Amino acid sequence: MRSMGTATDIQVRAALPADWQEVRELCCESCSEPPFYLTGNEGWPTYGQEDWVDYSVGPEHAMFLLFDRSTSPPYPIGKARISTANGDPTTAVADGIYIRAAYRGRGLSKLLWEARITWARVHELRRITTIHRLSNVRSMRSILTQGFVETERIPAETISGATEPELVYELVL
Ligand SMILES: CC(C)(COP(=O)(O)OP(=O)(O)OC[C@H]1O[C@@H](n2cnc3c(N)ncnc32)[C@H](O)[C@@H]1OP(=O)(O)O)[C@@H](O)C(=O)NCCC(=O)NCCS
């Protein structure tokens, strides 16, 4: 088992084109945790290097990566994405937050939120929206801790065909 770094060893930064393999690894690993993950990831299995770079780096979106720097090279332990909303120049959409299981419950989701909130402010956006499935309590707590307010519940199907609401949140900047 890996030894884990202390809080001061953990760093968050925006993904660079050279990080595409780390992004791919974290994204693909996150898909193995249904039913929390929603639609939008269907193309991932066929993505090549250029697709992963486009997905991570661009003028209207960013991928943030969390690293444990107690090892060399630093070990990637989480990721989260933010983008401007389609057709709405005032709003950012935050999605795809994932922290490797061994690193959960240490308050590290805050770092990925702070990086994305800063990104939205720098881009002069007015609000951030995000969603989670009702049963995903860890995600709910992580979102609420940042000051997000629930705006809507949308009925949605789980992978197994059951119904479970998606909760929609907004953070006004
Ligand atoms: C969602 C996720 C990023 C949150 O990160 P985390 O490391 O688990 O959570 P943190 O330690 O940063 O804590 C965030 C909040 O969740 C709470 N929390 C942590 N572990 C918890 C658990 N097992 N049960 C309930 N709440 C929990 C913390 O207490 C904290 O809330 P608080 O500030 O009110 O105390 C992480 O659990 C994850 O990657 N889950 C799998 C992927 C996923 O579900 N992504 C979200 C899709 S919408």
Image: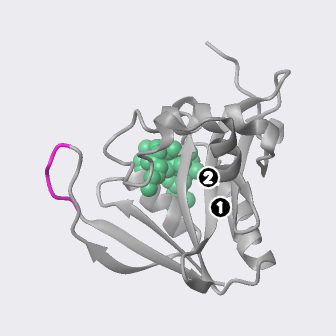
Front residue (pair 56, 132): 56
Q: Position of residue 23 (x, y in %)?
A: 65, 39
Ligand 1 is within 8 Å of the C-beta of the residue at disc 2: yes
| Image quadrant where residue 94 sits | bottom right
Query: Compared with residue 100, is residue 85 higher up or lower down, i.e. above or below?
Result: below
Applied colour scheme: one colour
Tag 2 residue:
80
Highlighted magenta segment, given as a residue range: 160-164
Please, what is the three-letter code of the amino acid marked with disc 2? Ala
Q: Amino acid at mark 1?
A: Trp
Q: Residue at x 45, y 48 (%)?
A: 41
The crowd level at tag 2 (other Cα within 10 Å; few <14, some 14-19, many 20+) is many
- Count how many numbered circles sit on residues in the image: 2
Q: Position of residue 86 (x, y in %)?
A: 54, 76
* Residue 21 in which image quadrant: top right
Q: Looking at this rendering, what residue extends furthest in the top direction?
A: 1
Badge 1 density bin: few <14, some 14–19, many ≥20, Cα 10 Å = many
**Whole-number angstrom distance, CA of label 2 to CA of label 1:** 8 Å
Q: In the shown orientation, is residue 148 left or right of residue 77?
A: left
Could you tell me which residue is drawn at 65 percent across and 61 percent down?
A: 113
* Residue at image coords 30%, 60%: 134
Q: Secondary structure at mark 2?
A: strand
- Are the residues flagged by discs 2 and 1 in contact, CB closer than 8 Å? yes
Using the rendered view, name the quadrant where residue 167 is placed.
bottom left
Residue drawn at (65%, 48%), measured in percent from left and top?
108
Residue 65, horizontal then vertical, whole percent = 71, 45
Q: Is residue 59 left or right of residue 30?
A: right
The residue positioned farthest toward the left in the image shown? 162
Residue 113: assigned label: 1
The x and y percentages for residue 42 are 41, 45
Circle 1 — which element?
A: helix
Of labels 2 and 1, earlier in sequence is 2
